[in-house]
């Protein structure tokens, strides 16, 4: 997570509807009643992860955060000259790739969790206070930070104490956890909430598309509706358990709702480095809100003078390791308009299928190409499911839009087969073209399967010739330990007790009767097709015998290969 800055905040309460709502909700908990000259909560004010009575750490491990507020100057205000905020257009600018990630996360969650109604402006507010929008949009072409954004070591010295949970895989620390990436997830919360937001098959906390979707998914947890103040506040406080954090996020949320615009990646100054970087205790003497003196520097090093009238007197001097705001580095050019895509190519190997109720092993994928047949990056492809099988994309949506990467590939989310077998089509449509470009990908939902079949009755399987077996044979089919409803099964009477006697239906011995009005002689059968009920149960019809004695086998097999073989004995009449 980014630094906890003692930035000078503008005097006076914010007259915004969201801040007022936040204050009303927080006043009952003993929180300060106004948003003004309050620094962000220190580590001592926040509960440490793993404390008694606390089930899970927050998303960020309650790390420090940026306390900058948006401009509060308004009609009738008389702020001193050095308190004059930056222009609204500069403060409301969001780097292009970061803004795209926030909006894509909102669209994805609107399809998969429409009840939540998470707004992209809320994700932007959190991204602002967590990392300054990924350090001002310093990202590569895939939306990944060139180097990880790491919060301080959570070793209990000034911060929460969270022992390592990922072996250093995400944060490079094998002793303690650190918050990682633009949205500052600690490794254990990333393991639970990490998402693949850009469709590359990976969950990377350093990728803004993955991180933004993960943040939105967390905010929507517990069936929240973020248009309800209580749910909104609980979601934000779950991200970082600080009342001041809640207020800061709500200020930016309200500010972005009133207007935000796109700026080139890397065109904004990166936020200052945290005072707790490297696991050191935060500075014991932070600048108090409203104090006009500049931030202290290390002994023996001169303080860099501020430019007159640029408002920098209210900003802490960044450490020497943080370069001053400059033009974007050559490796992160401003976004340009890509060459348009003109065609789609199916990357699958033909029709794909899955049994009812299961996940498809293959994800529909296409490549967008330009007129010269080269991959088209940043093309938008809409995948739409058609058919009567009840199949959906993971999350419940039947329509999703994916943006291609540098290789031109757009891969749909995983498919979950519905409960009704049949054909389906995934229609891939290239958006933004004058003439519709559509590709139909064929798929099929096959009959549900079972991987285990067990007998559940205790019927005696011995009967006299010319009589009927006592009771009916009952079995239960399961798949992955769960009941397998709607699974087809065949029950076949086989001759002899040895498999060497063959697997073809016997022509004499025990038999079933099919329903009908014909004479019983005409309704005899030694092979039946059945289907499991809603609980995966099979109840076979009564078994009758002719005058043939001996040992027979009853073989019951389900779709998916689950088999039970029972021995039937027919004896001479008493």
Image: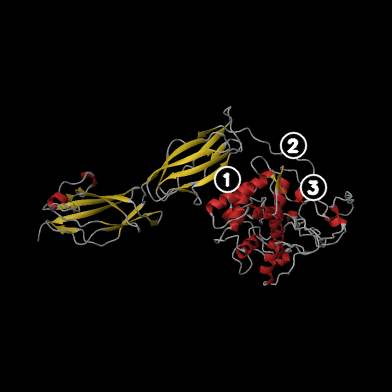
Farthest top residue in view: 372
Farthest left residue in view: 574
SS for tag 2?
loop
Q: How is the image coloured?
A: secondary structure
Q: Is residue 344 left or right of residue 270?
A: left
Quadrant assignment, res 485:
bottom left
Q: Position of residue 441 (x, y in %)?
A: 46, 38
Q: Which residue is mark 2?
A: 330
Looking at the image, residue 168 lies above or below residue 379 = below
Which comes before the other along the chain, label 1 or label 3? 1
Q: CA distance from mark 1 to mark 3?
A: 31 Å
SS for tag 3?
loop
Residue that appears at 71% across and 39% down: 334
Which comes before the other along the chain, label 2 or label 3? 3
Residue 202, label in figure: 1
Q: Residues within 10 Å of mark 2 (few under 14, many from 20)?
A: few
Q: Which residue is mark 3?
A: 321
Q: Position of residue 144 (x, y in %)?
A: 66, 44
């Amino acid at each position: 997570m980014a630094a906890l800055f003692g930035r000078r905040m503008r005097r006076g309460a914010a007259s915004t509807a969201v801040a007022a709502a936040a204050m009303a909700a927080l006043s009952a908990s003993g929180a300060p009643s106004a948003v003004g000259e309050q620094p962000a909560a220190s580590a001592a004010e926040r509960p440490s992860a793993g404390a008694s009575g606390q089930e899970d750490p927050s998303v960020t491990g309650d790390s420090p955060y940026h306390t900058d507020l948006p401009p509060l100057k308004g009609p009738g205000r008389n702020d001193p000259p050095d308190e004059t905020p930056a222009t609204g257009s500069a403060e409301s600018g969001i780097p292009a790739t970061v803004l795209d990630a926030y909006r894509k996360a909102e669209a994805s969650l609107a399809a998969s969790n429409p009840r939540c109604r998470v707004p992209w402006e809320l994700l932007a507010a959190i991204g602002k206070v967590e990392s300054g929008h990924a350090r001002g949009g310093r990202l590569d072409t895939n939306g990944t930070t060139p180097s990880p954004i790491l919060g301080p070591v959570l070793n209990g010295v000034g911060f929460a104490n969270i022992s390592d949970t990922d072996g250093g895989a995400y944060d490079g620390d094998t002793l303690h956890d650190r918050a990682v990436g633009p949205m500052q997830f600690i490794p254990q919360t990333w393991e639970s909430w990490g998402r693949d937001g850009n469709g590359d098959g990976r969950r990377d906390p350093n990728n803004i598309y993955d991180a933004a979707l993960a943040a939105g998914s967390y905010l929507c947890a517990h069936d929240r509706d973020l248009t309800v103040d209580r749910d909104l506040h609980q979601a934000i406080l779950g991200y970082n358990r600080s009342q001041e954090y809640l207020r800061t996020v709500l200020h930016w949320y309200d500010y972005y709702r009133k207007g935000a615009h796109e700026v080139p990646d890397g065109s904004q100054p990166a936020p200052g480095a945290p005072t707790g970087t490297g696991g050191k205790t935060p500075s014991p003497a932070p600048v108090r809100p409203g104090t006009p003196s500049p931030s202290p520097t290390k002994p023996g090093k001169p303080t860099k003078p501020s430019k007159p009238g640029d408002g920098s007197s209210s900003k802490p001097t960044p450490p020497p390791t943080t370069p001053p705001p400059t033009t974007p580095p050559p490796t992160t050019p401003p976004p340009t308009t890509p060459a348009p895509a003109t065609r789609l190519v199916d990357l699958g190997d033909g029709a794909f299928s899955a049994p009812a109720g299961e996940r498809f092993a293959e994800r529909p994928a296409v490549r967008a190409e330009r007129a010269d047949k080269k991959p088209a990056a940043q093309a938008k492809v809409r995948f739409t499911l058609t058919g009567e099988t009840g199949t959906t994309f993971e999350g419940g949506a039947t329509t999703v839009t994916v943006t291609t990467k540098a290789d031109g590939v757009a891969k749909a989310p995983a498919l979950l087969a519905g409960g009704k077998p049949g054909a389906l089509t995934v229609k891939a449509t290239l958006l933004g073209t004058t003439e519709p470009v559509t590709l139909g990908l064929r798929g099929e939902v096959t009959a549900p399967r079972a991987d285990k079949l067990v007998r559940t009755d205790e019927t005696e399987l011995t009967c006299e010739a010319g009589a009927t077996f006592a009771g009916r044979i009952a079995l239960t089919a399961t798949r992955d330990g769960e009941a397998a409803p709607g699974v087809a099964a065949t029950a076949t009477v086989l001759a002899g007790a040895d498999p060497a006697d063959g697997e073809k239906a016997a022509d004499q011995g025990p038999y079933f009767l099919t329903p009908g009005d014909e004479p019983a002689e005409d309704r005899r059968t030694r092979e039946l097709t059945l289907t499991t009920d809603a609980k995966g149960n099979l109840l076979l019809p009564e078994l009758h015998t002719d005058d043939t004695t001996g040992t027979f086998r009853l073989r019951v097999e389900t779709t998916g290969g689950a088999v039970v073989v029972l021995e039937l004995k027919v004896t001479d009449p008493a």
